[in-house]
C-alpha cells in the first residue's frame, strides 16, 4: 500500500461538528458588524507579492519568513494572503470607493496563510474575522471599531478578556524615535539576546517583545515612543480613550505593545484572553493604517481596523454549540420499495421537513435502529401492504397509502 497522504502540518479540516460552531460565530459577527454598517467583502486568496511586502513591511517576520510566495505560469510573483487589510485597501482603491460616503466599512471572514510553527492557536492556514473602516481619520472611528470587536467577544462569551491600547504616532516621529532607540540598544548591546542584537537595525521595536531576561531589564529603562509624540497624536489618542470610557469599555494602556505588521500609525490595540496560552493569547487586534493606501500607489487615505482569529475565538468562547434541527421523518423500506421510499423522502424535504432515508442497504431491523438513533418523530416503513407510519411521540402505528403520508404528518412537524 502506498503511504497515506495527510493534511499539511498546521492545517486542519472543518468537519460538520466544527462547521456548526463556526457558522454560529460568523452569524454573530455578521449581525453585530452589519448593524454598524459594515458590508461583507471577499478578496482573492492570492495577490501580487508587493501588496504585502510594501505594507506589512520587508523587515517583518511575516514577509521575511512566513509568506507562501511562488511564481505563477506567467512568471509573476504571487503570495497567498497572510492578512486582509492590504487587500481590503487595494479593493477600495481599485473600485474608486473614495467617491462613496466615507468611511467605507468592510468586514470579512476568510482564510489566511502564514508559514509559522504550528501549535495550539497557531496554524499555517487559519481564519480571521476582520473589519476595516477606510476613509476617515476621526478618532470616533477608532473607538467604534474597537467597540465592535469587544461586542463580538462579549456575544460569544469569550473568557477573561483584556483590552490593551497603545499609540504609535505618525511615521516621522516614529523614524526619529527608532534612531534614538537604536542608539540606546547599541549602547547596551552586551546585555541583549543574540536575536535582538541581530535585528537592531531592521526592527529595534521588537526588542520590547523579547522574552530574554537581561534584554527585558534593558528595555525597562529604554526610551518610550509615547514620550516623543507630537501633541496632535497625543490628542487623537486621548480622544479615543475618552470615547471608550464614555462607552464603558475598560482598557489598559501599554506603551510597549508591538504588533508584527509595519503599516500601523497612531492607535494600536489588542484583545487578549487569559483562557489561552500566553504565546497565543491575542484573540484579535489591529489599529490605524493611515499610510497604507499611499504605500500601494493610492491617494492618501486613512484607515482603521482589526482582525481576530476564528480558531482562538472558538477556543476562548463559552457559547454553546448550536444544536441541529431535529429530524422529523425517517423513511425505511422493505426490499422492492426503494423507489417509492426515495420519492417520499424527496417530497418531504421539498416540503421543508428534516428527513433521513436509508442509504446503506440495511435490513429493516437495522433501518429501525438508525431511525431511533436519528431521533426522528415519524418513521414511515414502506412494505407490501402500504406504508406503516409510526409516531415515536406515542400513538398507534397506522397503515396508510403511500401518497397520504405527507397529509398525515403535515401540521405536526
Ligand atoms: P494580526 O495580529 O497579524 O493582524 O492577526 C490578527 C489575529 O489573527 C491574531 O490576533 C490571531 O488571533 C490571528 N492569527 C494570526 N496569525 C495566526 C496563525 N498563524 N494562526 C492562528 N491565528 C492567527 C492582522 O492580520 C491585521 N490585518 C489586523 C488588522 C486589520 N489591522 C488593521 N486592520
Image (cartoon, rainbow, N blue to C red):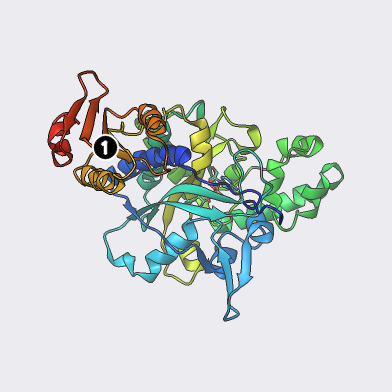
Task: Tell me the quadrant of the picture where the C terminus can be found.
Answer: top left
**Residue lying at 63% horizontally and 32% vertically, measured from the top left:** 277
Measuring from the top left, give residue 297's x and y in whole percent: 48, 72
Q: Residue 126 at x, y = what percent?
A: 54, 49
- Is residue 125 toward the left or the right of residue 235 in the image? right
Give the quadrant of residue 190.
top right
Tell me the quarter of the image containing the N terminus. bottom right
Circle 1 is placed at which residue position? 383
Left or right position of 81 against 215: left
| SS at mark 1 in the image | strand
Q: Nearer the viewer, residue 327 or 357?
A: 357
Observer-nearest residue: 153 or 178?
Answer: 153
Name the image quarter holding residue 173: bottom right
User: Measured along the vertical axis of the image, is residue 123 above or below residue 314?
Assistant: below
Q: Residue furthest top?
A: 394
Does residue 276 show up?
yes
Rendered view: 99 above or below 312: below
Taking the image as drawn, is residue 238 in sight? no
- Which residue is located at x 30 percent, y 58 percent? 102
Amino acid at each position: 500500500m502506498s503511504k497515506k497522504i495527510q493534511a499539511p502540518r498546521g492545517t486542519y479540516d472543518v468537519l460538520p461538528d466544527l462547521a456548526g460552531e463556526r457558522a454560529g460565530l460568523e452569524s454573530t459577527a455578521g449581525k453585530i458588524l452589519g448593524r454598524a454598517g459594515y458590508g461583507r467583502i471577499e478578496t482573492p486568496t492570492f495577490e501580487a507579492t508587493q501588496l504585502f511586502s510594501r505594507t506589512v513591511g520587508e523587515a517583518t517576520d511575516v514577509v521575511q519568513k512566513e509568506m507562501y510566495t511562488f511564481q505563477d505560469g506567467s512568471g509573476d510573483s504571487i503570495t497567498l494572503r497572510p492578512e486582509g487589510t492590504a487587500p481590503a485597501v487595494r479593493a477600495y482603491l481599485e473600485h474608486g470607493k473614495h467617491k462613496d460616503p466615507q468611511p467605507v466599512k468592510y468586514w470579512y471572514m476568510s482564510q489566511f496563510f502564514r508559514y509559522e510553527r504550528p501549535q495550539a492557536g497557531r496554524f499555517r492556514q487559519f481564519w480571521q474575522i476582520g473589519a476595516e473602516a477606510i476613509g476617515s481619520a476621526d478618532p470616533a472611528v477608532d473607538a467604534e471599531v474597537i467597540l465592535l470587536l469587544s461586542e463580538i467577544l462579549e456575544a460569544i462569551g469569550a473568557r477573561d478578556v483584556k483590552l490593551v491600547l497603545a499609540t504609535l504616532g505618525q511615521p516621522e516621529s516614529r523614524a526619529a524615535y527608532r534612531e534614538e532607540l537604536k542608539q540606546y540598544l547599541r549602547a547596551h548591546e552586551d546585555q541583549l539576546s543574540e536575536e535582538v542584537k541581530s535585528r537592531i537595525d531592521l526592527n529595534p521595536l521588537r526588542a520590547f517583545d523579547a522574552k530574554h531576561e537581561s534584554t527585558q531589564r534593558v528595555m525597562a529603562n529604554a526610551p518610550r515612543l509615547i514620550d516623543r509624540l507630537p501633541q496632535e497624536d497625543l490628542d487623537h489618542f486621548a480622544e479615543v480613550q475618552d470615547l471608550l470610557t464614555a462607552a464603558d469599555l475598560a482598557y489598559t494602556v501599554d506603551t510597549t505593545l508591538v504588533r508584527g505588521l509595519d503599516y500601523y500609525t497612531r492607535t494600536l490595540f489588542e484583545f487578549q484572553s487569559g483562557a489561552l496560552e500566553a504565546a497565543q493569547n491575542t484573540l484579535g487586534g489591529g489599529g490605524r493604517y493611515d499610510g497604507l493606501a499611499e504605500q500601494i500607489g493610492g491617494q492618501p487615505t486613512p484607515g482603521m481596523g482589526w482582525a481576530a482569529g476564528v480558531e482562538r475565538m472558538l477556543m476562548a468562547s463559552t457559547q454553546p454549540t448550536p444544536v441541529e434541527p431535529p429530524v422529523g421523518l425517517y423513511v425505511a423500506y422493505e426490499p422492492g420499495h426503494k423507489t417509492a421510499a426515495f420519492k417520499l423522502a424527496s417530497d418531504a424535504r421539498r416540503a421543508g421537513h428534516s428527513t433521513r432515508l436509508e442509504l446503506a442497504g440495511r435490513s429493516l431491523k437495522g433501518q429501525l435502529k438508525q431511525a431511533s438513533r436519528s431521533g426522528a418523530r415519524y418513521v414511515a416503513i414502506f412494505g407490501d401492504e402500504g406504508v406503516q407510519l409510526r409516531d415515536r411521540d406515542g400513538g398507534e402505528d397506522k397503515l396508510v397509502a403511500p401518497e397520504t403520508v405527507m397529509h398525515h404528518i403535515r401540521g405536526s412537524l
